[in-house]
Amino acid sequence: MSASAFVVVMRVELHFPDAGSLKGKRRELSPVKTQLHDRFGAAVAEVDHQDLWQRATLLAALTGSSAARLDAAVDDVQRWLDARFPHGAVVDRALLSLADVLEFSHGAGEAD
């Protein structure tokens, strides 16, 4: 494998203190998901707390050929979220090379 390839997966925890309904939360969450996709190029899905009014957990992923660029991109996402959510947005990240992903996927079916 000669080409460098990386993926960064982010878990984003958001709080919507002013949302008084699921509809209100969706009204605030929808533009966040759109911006993460359009502005940063992330694939985004809501993965938890779909039934809660004031919380959301998103999973977002970015891919690229440079680990340093992806790390910087996640820093940009964090800054953007911090500016948009003054009460805080928690972003956890995992950066993996293609070799890491392939090693994990091939080893996942093996028993110790």
Image (cartoon, rainbow, N blue to C red):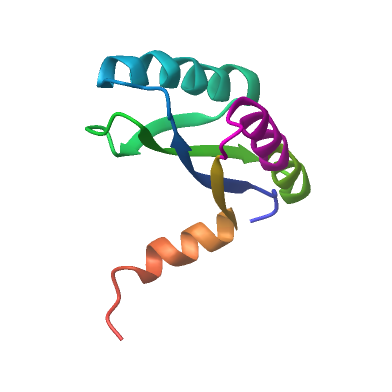
Taking the view exactly as shown, the residue that stands out farthest to the left is: 51
Image position, residue 51 (x, y; %):
22, 32
Q: Is residue 109 above or below residue 7?
A: below
Instruction: Check residue 98 for magenta coloring.
Output: no
Quarter of the rendering occupied by the C terminus:
bottom left
Image position, residue 26 (x, y; %):
35, 18
Q: Nearer the viewer, residue 69 or 91?
A: 91
What residue sits 28% from the left and 15% below the top? 23
Q: Is residue 91 above or below residue 17?
A: below
User: Horizontally, is 74 left or right of 17 in the view?
Assistant: right
Magenta stretch secondary structure, dominant: helix
Q: Nearer the viewer, residue 41 or 106?
A: 41
Q: Which residues are magenta?
A: 74-88
Q: Nearer the viewer, residue 85 or 11?
A: 85
User: Horizontally, is 13 left or right of 25 in the view?
Assistant: right
What residue sits 48% from the left and 59% below the top? 102
Quarter of the rendering occupied by the N terminus:
bottom right
Image position, residue 65 (x, y; %):
70, 43
Instruction: Check residue 85 for magenta coloring.
Output: yes
What residue sits 38% from the left and 35% below the top? 56
Quadrant location of residue 40? top right
Image position, residue 28 (x, y; %):
44, 17
